[in-house]
Image (spheres, rainbow, N blue to C red):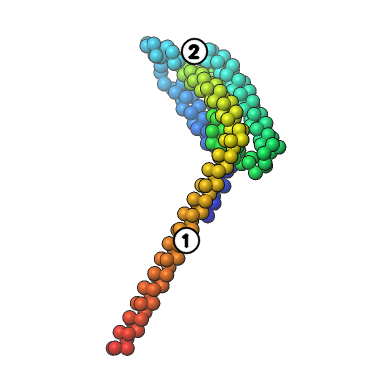
Amino acid sequence: MILKLLLKIRHNIWIIPSIYSVISIILALIVIYIDSTIDVKRDSLIMNLLFTEVDLARTILVSIAPSLLTMTTFTFSIIMVVLTTYSSQYSPRTLPTFMTDRITMRILAFFMGSFIYSVITLLFMKRSISEPYVVSATICILLAIVCLAFFAFFIHHVGTFIQVSKLVERLTNEGLEVLDDLSKMEKQKRMRIEDLHFLIHITMVSLLHQKHMDILN
């Protein structure tokens, strides 16, 4: 029952994006708490680089948030095109191979999480904030840079993923994994049957011994 539930969760494409979205919300709340309560003194070069003014941070977030949404939409469009190509040129049975690909789902989830973080931090970016300097914009810039790197890697990944040789290799590996799992399950089943036979044998011997003792008494 638990194994079936884990397999069902694994094949749901919304699990990884949901996890990344929750993590981004937690990160945004932590950053908002830091920006609102912690007194920051820009007395070093690192502090000057990490913390920005509220107006500048708001401008950065307003610029990055739509860009992340556009990148997420474009990535989702690429996924739809690949799914259409798979179903038309190969076979509809190959669709789960791409839909459950961890790299694809994690990249899309990271884009979604970055957009959620930028929107939430922008929502709480007010002029009445207690501290004149905030770190939320710097973190958003870092997330945007990572998103660009992931986007370039995603393009390369899609280009290699749809190759016929790669598809045959993945299907072969998946088939071997299924056979290996079935072999392990069959082995465990045999071990359980042997244990059951041994338990029955011990029980019968014990009953016979008890009956023999009763006769002697």
Where residue 111 appears, as percent x and y from the top left, is 56, 27
Q: Quadrant of residue 96?
A: top right
Q: What's the amino acid at mark 2? A: Glu
Q: Nearer the viewer, residue 110 or 121?
A: 110
Where residue 31 appears, as percent x and y from the top left, is 47, 24
Q: Which residue is painted at 60% across and 20% down in the image?
A: 67
Q: Which residue is painted at 64% across and 29% down in the image?
A: 78
Judge depth for marks 2 and 1 and give the one in front: 1
Give the spatial CA distance, label 2 vs label 1.
65 Å
Q: Which residue is painted at 30% across and 84% down in the image?
A: 213
Is 194 positioned to the left or the right of 151 in the image? left
Q: Earlier in the sequence, mark 2 or mark 1?
A: 2
Farthest-out residue, front = 165
Per the image, label 1 sits on a secondary structure element best described as helix
Residue denoted by label 2: 53
Q: Is residue 83 above or below residue 28?
A: below
Q: What's the amino acid at mark 1? A: Lys
Q: Quadrant of residue 84?
A: top right
Q: Nearer the viewer, residue 37 or 50?
A: 50
In which quadrant is the C terminus drawn?
bottom left
Where residue 215 appears, as percent x and y from the top left, is 32, 88
Q: Is residue 128 above or below residue 17?
A: above
Q: Quadrant of residue 65?
A: top right
Packing grade of label 1 (10 A; few <14, some 14-19, many >=20) is: few
Residue denoted by label 1: 189
Packing grade of label 2 (10 A; few <14, some 14-19, many >=20) is: few
Where residue 191 appears, as percent x and y from the top left, is 43, 62
Q: Which mark is residue 110?
A: none
Does residue 2 show up?
Answer: no
Per the image, label 2 sits on a secondary structure element best described as strand
Q: Which residue is painted at 44% across and 23% down in the image?
A: 34
Q: Nearer the viewer, residue 110 or 59?
A: 110
